[in-house]
Structures are given as C-alpha cells and as structure tokens.
Image: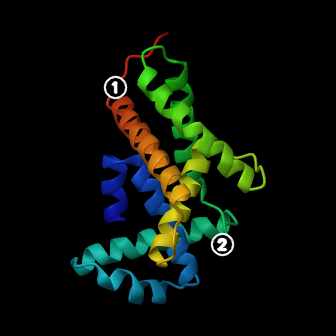
Amino acid sequence: MIIAQQKRKENICEYLLYMWQVEDLIRANHFDMEQIREHVISRYQQPDETKEKIAAWYEELIEMMRSEGVMESGHIQLNKNVIISLTDLHLRLLKSPKEMVYGAAYYKTLPYIVQLRAKSGGKDIPEIETCFTALYGYLMLRMQGKEVSNETMEAIKQISSFLALLAEKYKADMNGEIEWED
C-alpha cells in the first residue's frame, strides 16, 4: 500500500509492475491473510496501525481478485484501467505532431513488440500491455536467477526505455504539462 501509493505518484509503469507482483504475491500465499501477515506485512518496519491499514489493503485486493475471477491468472480491473489509460495516452502521443521523440521511441520498440506478440500466439492484447508483460516476465526470470539471452536483453532495454518515456509523459500529462492539439 505504502509502496504502491508512492510508485503511483512517481512512476506509473513501476506502479503497474509492482501491482502485478502484489497479485502474484497474493496467489503465492493462497489468498490467506494469515500467510500474508506472516510473510509480507510483518516485514514492514511500520507502526501497528499502519500495518493494519496495509492488511486491509491486501484484504481489499484479495476480494477484488476473487470477485473479478483472477485468482489463477490475469489482473484486476484496477490494473487493467492503468493499461487502458496508458494505451489512450500512447495513442494520443503518436497522433501529436509535437511528440516526434515519443513516436521515434515507439517505432524503435515496435519490432520487439511484433516479435513478442508472435511468440505469445498472437493474442489480441494492447501493445503497451505486451511491453509490460515482457518486462514483468524478465523481472521474474531475474528473481529466479535464470539466464537471459543477449537478444532478450536488447529487447528488454529498448522496451524499458520506451516505457520510461511513456511514464514521463503520463506524469507530465497528469500535471497538465502537455499541450494537446484540439
């Protein structure tokens, strides 16, 4: 909760990756609040009152995951909404004649997106979600200590760079710093 709030303010892309990790953490603890209290919440160096707020946040997420049917896999609507917002911003940036740097970053990343979509069986998911899925998969491989090919590392570097730019643009848009053509 504390980390999520901080990341949401600072970097929307890091926030989404963190929230996907929280979803997996809940799954790994079998939706059991006692396990989450023991393995997750107990590690926070916070007063008991704050730990209770964190526990309530996890309980809310568990309820969302259950009610939205994403106990095995998938993401809660809260996280899907971030993808929708980022995709909307992405499309507006591509259409803006003032955002040529963004467009160039996207077109440099596009071949990797196409490759990833082909490898995933051509599922019809937004390009931005494809980027997040690749980055999250890479982070999971690193956490497991698994080897990553040079080709994959090249793709991850480009995707990371592109998402970092998108995160900057998201923050600028939220702060009213982007001038949009009407």
Above/below status of 179 relative to 29: above
Would residue 168 appear left or right of 145 to someone viewing this image?
Answer: left
Q: Amino acid at mark 2?
A: Met
- Disc 1 and disc 2 in contact, CB within 8 angstroms: no
- Front residue of 125 and 58: 125
The answer to whether residue 48 is visible is yes
x, y percent for residue 64: 59, 65
The answer to whether residue 78 is visible is no
Q: List the single residue furthest toward the front.
A: 150
**Residue pictured at 51% horizontal, 39% vertical:** 86
Give the residue pinned by disc 2. 71
- Front residue of 48 and 12: 12
Tag 1's secondary structure? Answer: loop
Q: How many numbered callouts?
A: 2
x, y percent for residue 47: 21, 78
* Image quadrant in which the N terminus is located: bottom left
Q: Which quadrant of the view contains residue 38?
A: bottom left
Local crowd at mark 2 within 10 Å, few (<14), some, or many (≥20)?
many
Q: List the single residue furthest toward the top.
A: 182
User: Cα distance, mark 1 to mark 2?
Assistant: 37 Å
x, y percent for residue 73: 67, 68
Q: Which mark is residue 109?
A: none
Would residue 49 appear left or right of 14 to someone viewing this image?
Answer: left
Tag 2's secondary structure? Answer: loop
**Residue pictured at 53% horizontal, 84% vertical:** 29
x, y percent for residue 72: 68, 73
Above/below status of 64 relative to 108: below
**Residue pictured at 22% horizontal, 79% vertical:** 45
**Residue pictured at 56% horizontal, 45% vertical:** 83
Q: Amino acid at mark 1?
A: Gly
Give the residue pinned by disc 1. 176
